[in-house]
Image (spheres, rainbow, N blue to C red):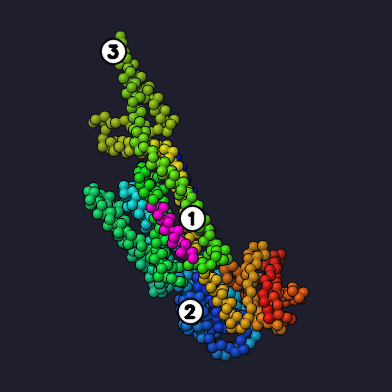
Amino acid sequence: MSQTIAPRVRTLLLLLLAVTGALLAGSAPVSAHAALTASDPQQGSVVKEAPAQVSLTFSEGVAMSDGSVRVLDPKGKRVDTGKTSEQGTNTYSVKLHSGLPDGTFTVTYQVVSADSHPVSGAFTFSIGAPSTTSVSVSDQEAGGGVVGGLYGFARYLSYAGFILLVGGAAFVLACWQRGTGERSVQRLVVSGWLALTGATLAMLLLRGSYTGSGKVGDIFDLSLLSDVLQTKTGAALVSRLLLLAAGALFIAVLFGAYEKREDDEEKGDLTFGLAIGGFVVAAGLAATWAMAEHASTGIQTGISMPVDVLHLLAVAVWLGGLSTLLVALYRAPSIEPAAVRRFSRIAFGSVAVLAATGIYQSWRQLGSWSAFTGTSYGQLLLVKIGLVVVLVGIAWISRRWTARLSQAPAAKTVKAAKTSAATPVKTTTKTSAKTPAKTSAAASAKASATAATSATSEKSEDEDRETGDEKEPAATPAGGGDGKRATQLARQRAAVATAREKRVRDADPLRSGLRRSVLAEAGVAVVLLAVTTVLTSTEPGRTVEEAEAATAASSQEATGALAVDIPFDTGGKDGKGLARVEIDPARVGGNDMHVYVQRPNGKAFDIPEVKVSFTLKAKDIGPLPVVPDRIATGHWTASGVQIPMAGNWAIAVTVRTSDIDQVTVDKNAQIG
């Protein structure tokens, strides 16, 4: 069993890297947490006169600087002053130059939402009449590319480091105080501290480029770093570094002064002090996430932030303790069944806290049952819930192994170890004892005894080689060796003793069963952590639905226009997207129609062809075909679309994404 430890650990590490890479690749660019709900002029609208400014309204407050909003004319020239200002609740504007020509203008924006995630997008409006434009909107959002991938990996590493640091220390203090002297446990907790510290420093350096240009060369731009330090996220990261300095002192005491204490009363007082201090540091570290991400925005922030801290602490105690138990089972010479039982009880309590806080967080972020399946956040949450169920199931198996292990007599293992160690000595001694003492010649008897002893010793060594047992080195005769030889022999004896302990430990089927189940738990936990990291970078379902409702209400209230969103999938590569059909004023007679084709991430989708038709099945009218003209990336328009009578019309959109990939999708809507 001991020979398979390294491959299993390597397999777990490879699984961690593979899952992280796949999820980060699938999640880039990162979904935003603030959505554009309204604009003035509206997306796709045609105004008679040039506006003095462009206003944008978001679903939540955002941080923006001069240059965050740009307005480009049909030739791609900037026509805004570059200075943005706040006009009202979540509404921001930028002034335009005077004397703008007629044609289609493109508005691009890049801001940072209140929960620290970058938001970017673009839309068009026209002055006088629509026209072609040379502006091509980039398909890459803020937060994507190489910098976005590095930032996402640093986020994952920070969560993993927090779990190992807090969970490992909690396991030692609450369950296995003897573990303070185990080097493997010390390395695990210190590795967690190093991972969290390194990831935090990396996020500070990457933050400016991540929310800005996305260029690798801007990572070490000190002016950008100065700007980051003035933001809420920058303050949270700096606070985390200060708390990690206190965490380093905690680790030094836990694995230094605490281990050396022999007086029970002094050790008890130090345990209490470390528990209080460790909880304060751990809660402070968890609060640095709560104050800068999901919990700090939206509804009930006064409740959600403490709940988020509890959720993170429960995750760390459960998964971090699980990781420490895994290391102890594979690396430590032994671990008491009582320590495993204590962790089992603590893990059960952590799962209960996770369930309660998770239910509240899910309600707060989703808002409706439909968001479970209708939004990316809800779908990822379903995956997370499934992984938690699997993890709890494996944990139940581990608890059964723990119960069986605690029922086995502890002395049995010790006795087996002593028997294994004593067997070669007994064989040699027994052979010597059986040397014939009553023979005709004393010299012959002595020679026979020596030969028998030598033969028995050689046979014992051969048997040990076949069974994998190590033979203890013979003692050096008094005065027959120097200090270097004595030291070498001492190391050999220690290695032999360690090998025997491992053989005895690995031969225990109860401990082996617990190892396998805990290893399986750790593997699922790696995937669960990756999914959770992506989930924190995904737009909450409540925000998505509120933004869609606000956009539809704003459009209907302003112009009476009808907006219909129709998802499509042509079946080919890069064939998924969303077609939005807007009809203004959506009444009998002539109407203006705009078609916007977007990718699943909301960016404009430039495809070869789009066609639209209208059918009123109740009156057997249609289909009435309309072929709109392309005027910008992902934007088609048609004027004078005739609707002969009011009714529930079927709007069919034909989308062609390549020479052979095409699909027609439809949706009913009331017109007139």
Pick whichever, 206 or 316, lies toward us: 316
Q: Position of residue 542 (x, y in %)?
A: 52, 69
| Residue that carries the numbered disc 2 in the rendered image | 90
The magenta region covers: 346-363
| Residue that carries the numbered disc 1 in the rendered image | 388
Query: Considering only vertical position in the picture, is 445 above or below 287?
Result: above
Dot in front, 1 or 3: 1
Callouts 1 and 2 close, C-beta under 8 Å:
no
Question: Which quadrant of the figure has residue 484?
Answer: top left
Task: Give the mark, 1 or 3, whose residue is nearer the N terminus.
Answer: 1
Tag 3's secondary structure? helix
Q: Amino acid at mark 3?
A: Ala
The furthest residue to the front: 618
**Left-right relation of 581 to 172:** right
Query: Considering only vertical position in the picture, is 571 above or below 396?
Result: below
Tag 2's secondary structure? loop
